[in-house]
Image (cartoon, rainbow, N blue to C red):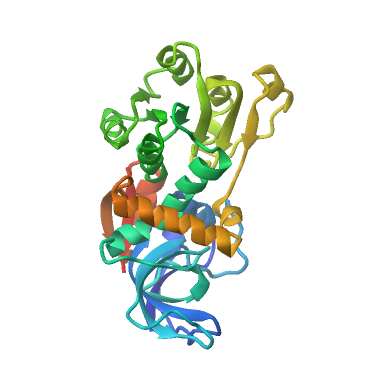
Amino acid sequence: MTKVVRVHEVGQPDVMRIEDIELPPPGPGEVRVRNHAIGLNYIDTYFRSGHYPVAQMPFIPGNEAAGEVVEIGRGVKGRKPGDRVAYTVSLGCYAQERNVDASRLVELPKSISYETGAAMMLKGLTAQYLLRRTYKVKKGDTILVHAAAGGVGLILCQWAKALGARVIGTVGSPEKARLAKKAGAKDVILYRDNDFVEAVKAITKGKLCDVVYDGVGRATFPASLDCLRPLGTFVSFGSASGPIEAFNIGILAQKGSLFVTRPTLTTYIAKQSDFEKMTRELVRMVKKGDVEIPIHATHKLDEIVTVHRALEGRETTGATVLLP
């Protein structure tokens, strides 16, 4: 038997239940992983609440984890019991053990802890595709990162600084401002106290930004478009404050022939070759120390209801890791 978190009906955090289930043996191409650490992400709340649909009920939430291989399925090559691995897959990670497609596993060097491995996959790969593929940030670019003290935000700040970009971040408190500054944001805007559009205009002396990375959603749109210079790119990769509603596409022309995109990690890692290239770059950046995965809290899996409440209340900073 293995302990898991299961959701039988979508809703508020208290719909999650701690249960024991019997896992089947790993199937062809699969391995069983004993999770040592599980990453917490805002997207987990979307599935739990019903904002994102699931294929069947009940389901186990969670989209990233790290641990050791304990059993190998038929046809698996290159993996053996005892291997240290990290992975991101859709759902099923809030568990002591689970079966995973072997091709989705990433070897975790001994220099990277299980906690870091669990926190770096979804958030780190998200930062990778945002900075290296959705809009390829280069030296001299000016970028705006909303929620700069969040799990993805802090990684974006570090990685963009390493690429030579000037980072402007928005945060909700002085404590979060300090975190964003430490991570590499040259300028930080307290959005509750200031109009972030006017602040961006002042910081850039009217030149504005090349790209805006927004995981907030409704609360920052369409104002974010006014932070972009002509031909700038608005990247919406999350909706912590609610989804962006339908808008008149003509405003993109009016505001400077802007580009707008709504990417997802699932699409960017769908091809195995892309997934492997992205993970190699992520692991390299973490090993070099250019990107430090900011783990600010650890909790037992049994505390999952309390943890989800804190996450939705924007009480968390950096990454939170669950220990099964």
Q: Quadrant of the C terminus?
A: bottom left
Residue placed farthest to the front in the image?
139
Q: Quadrant of the rendered structure where residue 10 is?
A: bottom right
- The answer to whether residue 251 is above or below residue 60 is above
Q: Quadrant of the N terminus?
A: bottom left
Residue at 48% x, 33% y: name it.
Answer: 138
Q: Is residue 167 left or right of residue 267?
A: left
Res 300 visible: no
Q: Is residue 269 left or right of residue 40?
A: right
Q: Quadrant of the rendered structure where residue 9 is?
A: bottom right
Q: Nearer the viewer, residue 259 or 324?
A: 259
Residue at 26% x, 31% y: name it.
Answer: 178
- The answer to whether residue 321 is above or below residue 96 is above
Residue at 59% x, 45% y: name it.
Answer: 263
Residue 146 spot, x, y in % from top left: 44, 33
Q: Is residue 33 left or right of residue 237?
A: left
Residue 236 spot, x, y in % from top left: 56, 38
Res 137 visible: yes
Residue 119 spot, x, y in % from top left: 36, 56
Tally the numbered discs: 0
Residue 153 spot, x, y in % from top left: 40, 40
- The answer to whether residue 320 is above or below residue 273 is above
Residue at 54% x, 36% y: name it.
Answer: 217
